[in-house]
Image (spheres, rainbow, N blue to C red):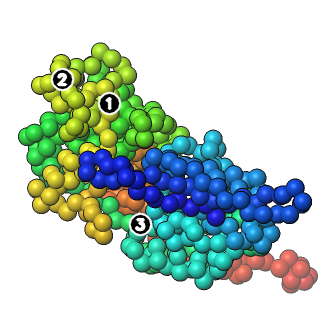
């Protein structure tokens, strides 16, 4: 089983000892006389990230090449199959989806199962794991996806012959009532105005970004993906065609969540006016590929001389997580609104999207049109999330149905029937 060992050297940096990280593992080799023996190996890396990368590579190779079989395979750690499954997804799913699977594994699954022999995982452990996820108060979607990573890893172990069956299959699906239902926190128009005004005092660009999100319903990654060319002030629309997500070493450009998420969203007149005034001050407004909403330089980042009077970095898009933590969250607290925190279901950045939906529905927009603006894959999604905000008069009947009544009985016409045979006998 491969593992990482931290070793502190005699070297010191900023008064602290410099650490190296050793990746250690064993390999089975066949000697000249035909005997099988274990050979211990190790490699040293300067950072924990580099060591983690090498560990995943080793575990993936061992599982993918069948280096372990039979009883020895049952003793292999769960992590070996997890990394093999994750690596097998490369090129078959979006990069951000794969990154999310890795995050779910490392956050929720690895702490419990990474070093456990895969053959020692029982159905009872699987049930206890799912119960623990529920007990943490996580969102229903998070529980489902984290457990799915766990289950699909065990599926791979079954395929590779390490275990006879998947112990996670026996765990029943989540039922209504098992998890507290999702509840959006849409803001009122006045609350949006108060939050935006608070941010505008110091960072007017980000105050506008709050108004923009509440008036368009874009997702966080879609906001980061907006470029100057996506804005059409003449047609009063914003075009959503890409997403951007910050990754190690730069930014990753992707596509929106689904086919219907590629959309055109109309802009209200007041927002068009605000955006026109904003673009007049945008230093890169003539560059179609420039970020519509920029990031800011970090505290320790050198600011170019030409940018000395403005700490916005107009070459880099705003990072949604930083935007929420440094600007939106403090503003929410300042105006008396609950902000999201571990264990607290307060207002999140995504709730500005819910705000757009609720305000639009409350203003009389049809839910099918709102669904298109939101980029939902199905109208059912819109109905499920916002059913309580949809006017019950939508889809009502123009003419009420008549009261159903039983048909009147047919008149008795027996007295009007003349028996011709009797009439002839009487005549004779």
Identify the mark nearer the N-term, 2 or 3. 3
Check whether the beta carbons of the residues at disc 1 and disc 3 lie within 8 A of each other.
no
Which corner quadrant holds the N terminus? bottom right
Quadrant in the rendering for residue 31: bottom right
84 vs 271: above or below: below
Mark 2 vs mark 3, foreground winner is: 2
Quadrant in the rendering for residue 385: bottom left
27 vs 213: above or below: below
Disc 3 is placed on an element classified as loop
Q: How crowded is mark 2: few (under 14 residues within 10 Å), some or many (20 or more)?
A: few
Quadrant in the rendering for residue 147: bottom right
Q: Which residue in the rendered view is the most extreme toward the top?
A: 286
Q: Nearer the viewer, residue 222 or 298?
A: 298
Point out which mark residue 316 bears.
1
Q: Which residue in the rendered view is the most extreme toward the front?
A: 10
Point out which mark residue 139 bears.
3
Disc 2 is placed on an element classified as helix
Number of marks: 3
Q: Name the residue under label 2.
A: 307
105 vs 287: above or below: below
Residue under the image location 66 percent in, 77 percent down: 120
Residue under the image location 50 percent in, 41 percent down: 260
Give x and y (percent) for residue 57.
Answer: 62, 50
Q: Nearer the viewer, residue 366 or 301?
A: 301
Point out which mark residue 414 bears.
none
Q: Can residue 378 be seen in this view?
A: no
Q: Is residue 8 visible?
A: yes
Residue under the image location 37 percent in, 45 percent down: 219
Check whether the beta carbons of the residues at disc 1 and disc 2 lie within 8 A of each other.
no
């Amino acid at each position: 089983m491969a593992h990482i060992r931290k070793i502190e050297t005699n070297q010191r940096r900023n008064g602290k000892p410099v650490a190296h990280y050793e990746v250690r593992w064993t390999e089975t080799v066949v000697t000249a006389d035909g005997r099988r023996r274990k050979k211990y190996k190790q490699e040293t890396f300067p950072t924990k990230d580099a060591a983690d990368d090498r560990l995943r590579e080793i575990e993936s190779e061992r599982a993918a090449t069948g280096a372990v079989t039979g009883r020895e395979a049952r003793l292999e750690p769960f992590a070996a199959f997890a990394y093999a499954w994750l690596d097998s997804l490369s090129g078959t799913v979006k990069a951000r989806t794969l990154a999310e699977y890795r995050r779910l594994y490392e956050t929720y699954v690895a702490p419990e199962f990474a070093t456990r022999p895969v053959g020692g995982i029982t159905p009872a452990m699987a049930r206890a794991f799912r119960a623990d996820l529920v007990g943490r108060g996580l969102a229903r979607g998070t529980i489902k996806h984290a457990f799915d990573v766990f289950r699909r890893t065990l599926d791979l172990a079954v395929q590779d012959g390490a275990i006879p069956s998947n112990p996670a299959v026996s765990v029943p699906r989540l039922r209504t009532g098992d998890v507290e239902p999702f509840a959006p926190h849409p803001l009122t128009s006045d609350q949006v105005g108060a939050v935006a005004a608070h941010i505008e005092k110091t960072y007017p660009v980000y105050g506008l970004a709050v108004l923009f999100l509440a008036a368009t319903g874009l997702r966080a990654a879609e906001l980061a993906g907006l470029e100057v060319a996506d804005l059409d002030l003449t047609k009063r629309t914003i075009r959503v065609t890409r997403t951007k997500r910050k990754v190690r070493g730069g930014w990753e450009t992707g596509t929106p969540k689904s086919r219907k998420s590629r959309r055109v969203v109309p802009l209200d007149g007041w927002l068009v006016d605000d955006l026109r005034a904003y673009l007049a001050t945008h230093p890169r407004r003539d560059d179609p590929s420039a970020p519509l909403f920029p990031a800011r330089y970090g505290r320790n980042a050198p600011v170019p001389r030409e940018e000395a009077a403005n700490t916005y970095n107009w070459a880099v898009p705003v990072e949604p997580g930083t935007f929420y933590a440094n600007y939106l969250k403090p503003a929410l607290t300042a105006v008396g609104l609950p902000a999201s925190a571990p264990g607290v279901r307060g207002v999140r950045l995504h709730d500005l999207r819910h705000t757009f939906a609720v305000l639009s529905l409350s203003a009389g927009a049809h839910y099918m049109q709102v669904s298109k603006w939101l980029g939902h894959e199905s109208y059912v999604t819109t109905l499920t999330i916002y059913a309580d905000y949809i006017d019950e008069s939508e889809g009502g009947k123009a003419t009420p149905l008549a009261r159903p009544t039983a048909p009147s009985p047919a008149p008795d016409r027996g007295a009007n029937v003349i028996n011709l045979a009797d009439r002839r006998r009487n005549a004779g």
